[in-house]
């Protein structure tokens, strides 16, 4: 599926949106783009007194209107201007962050969610343009938000936006497969990180092993790093 020279991106829409970009030349860059559901979920929970936890199916965002002034303020966040590799999380993008950005504006909840949805889509599209992404494969909870996915498709065009499952691996199982691969690499003494994605000087072996009652016997370190994974259906 990735066997051509077009740059491809793997986008995960969880609390934070993060992207991994593979160029046709084989170069890899990966980093956190910015908020996805983190701000949306907190805005819903706070506005409804906890009666709602999320914008289910993006219904509220779909019927809301983007507040252009608020969006402009949101886009001034310094994090977005940092060069990758970089990482962020809910220590920055939390409920208090939304309140501070909204300030004294009277923004109805549906409009706020439409604006936060537009923020995520804008940041994703910006990253795709910066890295020349022509095919974007999406996973994570945000995949089930039609409003968000619709705006991402609209803003990233003409790049193709598809579901991660189209690669032959279930989006639901992607992280489990990833942990299995990392475990395999660690057992065989192989690094599981890429300097271009972490900013470190070299790749590193991840994790640690805790032996049980019996001694732990590891295989001899491998001489080469595997370049692909084959998934066989049960």
Image: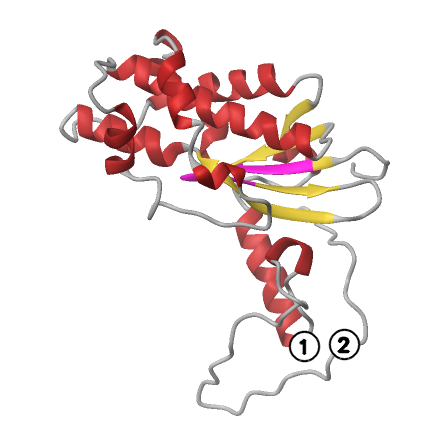
Query: Residue 74, position in %: x, y?
Result: 39, 27
- Residue holding disc 2: 222
Q: Foreground: 53 or 232?
A: 53
Q: Is residue 56 visible?
A: yes
Q: What's the residue at 77%, 54% (across, down)? A: 228
Label 1 to label 2: alpha-carbon separation: 7 Å
- Name the one closer to the observer, 124 or 187: 124
Q: Which residues are magenta?
A: 9-18
* Position above or below: 179 against 232: below
Decide: few, some or many residues near mark 2? Use Cα within 10 Å; few <14, some 14-19, many ≥20: few
Residue at (67%, 32%) from the top-left corner?
130
The residue under the point 62% across, 64% down is 200
Say whether marks 1 and 2 touch (CB < 8 Å): yes
Q: Which residue occupies the foreground of this view, 228 or 207?
A: 207
Provide the secondary structure element on which disc 1 rests. loop
Q: How far across and how far down the image is residue 68, in percent?
A: 40, 12
9, above or below 200, in the image: above
List x then y, in percent, for residue 44: 25, 26
Q: Residues within 10 Å of mark 1 (few under 14, many from 20)?
A: some
Answer whether residue 12 is magenta in the image: yes
Q: Taking 152 as reference, is 83 above or below it?
A: below
Q: Which mark is residue 189?
A: 1
> Which disc, if any, is residue 131?
none
């Amino acid at each position: 599926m990735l066997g051509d020279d077009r740059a491809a991106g793997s986008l995960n829409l969880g609390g934070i949106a993060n992207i991994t970009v593979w160029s046709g030349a084989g170069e890899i860059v990966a980093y956190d783009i910015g908020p996805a559901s983190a701000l949306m979920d907190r805005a819903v929970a706070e506005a409804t007194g906890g009666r709602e936890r999320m914008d289910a199916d993006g219904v509220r965002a779909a019927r809301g209107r983007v507040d252009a002034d608020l969006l402009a303020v949101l886009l001034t966040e310094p994090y977005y201007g940092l060069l990758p590799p970089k990482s962020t999380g809910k220590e920055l993008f939390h409920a208090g962050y939304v309140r501070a950005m909204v300030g004294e504006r009277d923004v109805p909840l549906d409009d706020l969610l439409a604006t936060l949805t537009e923020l995520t889509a804008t940041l994703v599209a910006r990253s795709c343009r910066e890295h020349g992404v022509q095919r974007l494969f999406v996973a994570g909870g945000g995949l089930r938000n039609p409003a968000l996915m619709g705006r991402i498709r609209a803003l990233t065009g003409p790049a193709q936006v598809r579901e991660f499952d189209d690669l032959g691996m279930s989006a639901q199982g992607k992280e489990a497969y990833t942990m299995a691969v990392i475990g395999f690499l660690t057992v065989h003494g192989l690094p599981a990180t890429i300097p271009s994605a972490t900013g470190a000087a070299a790749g590193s072996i991840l994790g640690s092993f805790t032996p049980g009652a019996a001694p732990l016997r590891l295989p001899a370190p491998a001489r080469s790093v595997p370049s692909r994974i084959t998934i066989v259906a049960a």
